[in-house]
Amino acid sequence: MKITDVKIIVCSPGRNFVTVKIFTDEGLTGVGDATLNGREKAVVAYLQEHLAPLLIGRDPSRIEDIWQYFYKGAYWRRGPVTMAAIAGIDTALWDIKAKAANMPLYQLLGGASREKVLCYTHAQGTDIAEAVEAVGRRIEQGYKAIRVQVGIPGLPDVYGTGKKSVTNNAADDAFPHEETWSTSKYLRYVPELFKAVREAHGWDIELLHDSHHRLTPIEAARLGKDLEFARLFWLEDTVAAEYQEGFRLIRKHTTTPLAVGEVFNTIWDARLLMEEQLIDYIRTTTVHAGGVTAQRRIMDFASVYNVRTACHGAMDMSPICLGANLHLDLWVPNFGIQEYSGYLPEILDVFPSAWSLKDGYLHPGEAIGHGVEIDEKLAEKYPYQRAYLPVNRLEDGTLWHW
Ligand code: GCO
Ligand code: MG
């Protein structure tokens, strides 16, 4: 088999997605997600200008060699743009390999280790009462695990609670939306949230929370301690994780389980965290960690250190990424949980998917390949729109982590 063509498809059915589609001389095609929220066109240029031309005429079955060729062969390794571009290609190649083998991808990976994939979804409110109500609605929908975020009194809008946190189209506003942050207000309020949620909904539901990289290690240690009573499933991204040693301090002070890694793009970003067992869940995901090849390697490495998997699965990763993740999730022995924040109906129309959700569990389905396609005709109806993630400032104007 030979690769005959590579298409980079950009569409915006509610938000921007970058999709790689690889064509072969035997008629098999494969698709991969290469979306990098807010920096989509950088990945498009990387793919179009630098990688796609080097794929023509290659044997698509040589996935590992192609991965190494683009990773080591670039000399300039790692980074979100490079790894999302490699991921788009790698995921499409696994799709083709599984289709050629006439199997769902999870069978190629080693087969199912479980019947279904536990997922967590999001609930939020501008205040505690609203958040408690939102959790109730999610429980009614059958979810077993819920990430809860709340607005903080005195701050106009906060990550994960307002519309503006989702995206920001340049069509109506040329600059990213700016949020305001106060760590001390946040640290005082969040334990109140979880006290109220436990009082209203009891202990049978798994609860999670995301600090979105905003704390220092000692602040994270305090929050972890203050939330121990609520028995969280995890506390996510407490600190910006470039300084991995910071987790030693957090770990020393709290038994609240820790998750990190949605912005990591290689196994090296998580090496120390895993080797020293400083985290409980690794949040890397197929599209940002270099594809199925690299994500599988991270998952295996994690298993050595009792770290469980928890693929990032917000709406800014396309249904193709979720599909690929779900095959890994069904296989991986050290599975933890899969994030699922749901998709707008337009997105699901553009990306027909074999995966399904029932009673708080996902399943990748039995379609051959990874089971997600792109409707190119429909995608054309949703042209790219320049968009940014918000930025975040302290009350005195200092630029802070978002
Ligand atoms: C999560 C994430 C997302 C990110 C988003 C950035 O835990 O799902 O933190 O909400 O902010 O994916 O593009
Ligand atoms: Mg997160």
Image: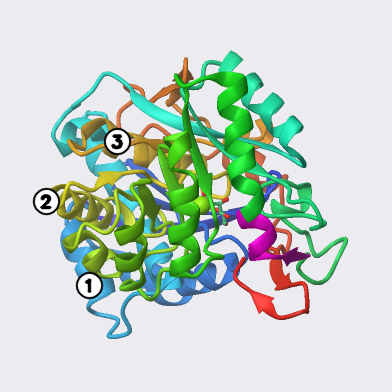
* Relative image position of residue 173 (x, y in whole percent): 86, 65
Question: Are the two marked residues, 1 and 3, in contact with CB atoms closer than 8 angstroms?
Answer: no
Amino acid at circle 3: Asp
Q: Residue at label 2?
A: 304
Residue marked by disc 1: 69
For discs 1 and 3, the disc positioned in front in the rendered view: 3
Q: Is residue 380 above or below residue 220?
A: above
The residue closer to the viewer here, 51 or 269, is: 269
- Of circles 1 and 2, the one toward us is 2
Q: Quadrant of residue 168?
A: bottom right
What's the distance in space between the residues labelled 1 and 3, CA to CA? 27 Å
Q: Is residue 180 magenta?
A: yes
- Residue nearest the observer in this picture, 206 or 320: 206
- The residue wearing badge 3 is 329
**Dot 1 and dot 2 residues touching (CB under 8 Å):** no
**Residue 397 bears which disc, if any?**
none
